[in-house]
Image (cartoon, helix red, strand yellow):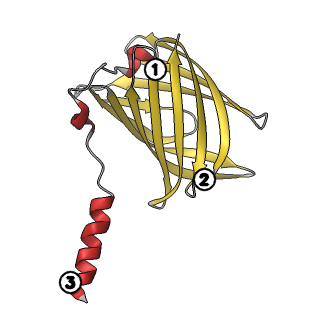
Amino acid sequence: MKALLMLGSVLALTACAVPDVSHYAKETPKLDVTQYFQGKTEAWGIFQKRSGEVVKRFHIKMEGHSQGDKFILKEHFFYTDGTDQERVWTFTRQTDGSLHGSAGDVLGVAIGKGAGDAFRMNYTLKLPVGKSVYNVKFDDWLFRIDEQTVVNRATVTKFGFEVGQVTVFFRHE
């Protein structure tokens, strides 16, 4: 019985393993998010519950620009239910090449790191749902497909349990 529990634990941990962003270092085209999101970008996405059911659809208009040693990214979300939301990110490049970001609805610091065609960012978002606000963790992965296109897949968790997935397709003008 003890051996079965150990085997189950090892399999569960292995299933949760995620590659490090450096795994994609040789992939092209290269993705530098501060270059890609410079200027205007549009995006389209969905939020799926853990079951796979799509519960939110949205369109995003974005504009990014450098301001001294900072990169500012303004996002305006338009949801199909008629609601909208704005977020303004401020990113600062660190000496190790990573990006630290902040926004009004982000708790603490978002930490992102890129390699090759990939960029991964982790942060806690204050997510409004109805009249409540939930602190959920985002594990964002962005992959550059071509010069104009980036695909984003994010896993959303609360207390370590997955609550949903976000998929977004970005198109740079």
Q: Quadrant of the N terminus?
A: bottom left
Tell me: 45 left or right of 117.
Answer: right
Name the quadrant containing residue 26. Answer: top left
Tell me: 142 left or right of 136.
Answer: left
In what element is the residue under mark 2? strand
Q: Earlier in the sequence, mark 3 or mark 1?
A: 3
Residue nearer the viewer, 129 or 28: 28
The residue sitting at 53% across, 42% down in the picture is 166
Rounded to the nearest angstrom, the CA distance separating label 1 from label 2 is 31 Å
Q: Name the amino acid type tagged 1.
A: Thr
**What residue sits right under mark 1 in the picture?**
149
Q: Earlier in the sequence, mark 1 or mark 2?
A: 2
In what element is the residue under mark 3? helix
The residue sitting at 25% across, 82% down in the picture is 4
Of the numbered discs in the image, which one, if any, rests on residue 134? Answer: 2
Q: Name the amino acid type tagged 2.
A: Tyr
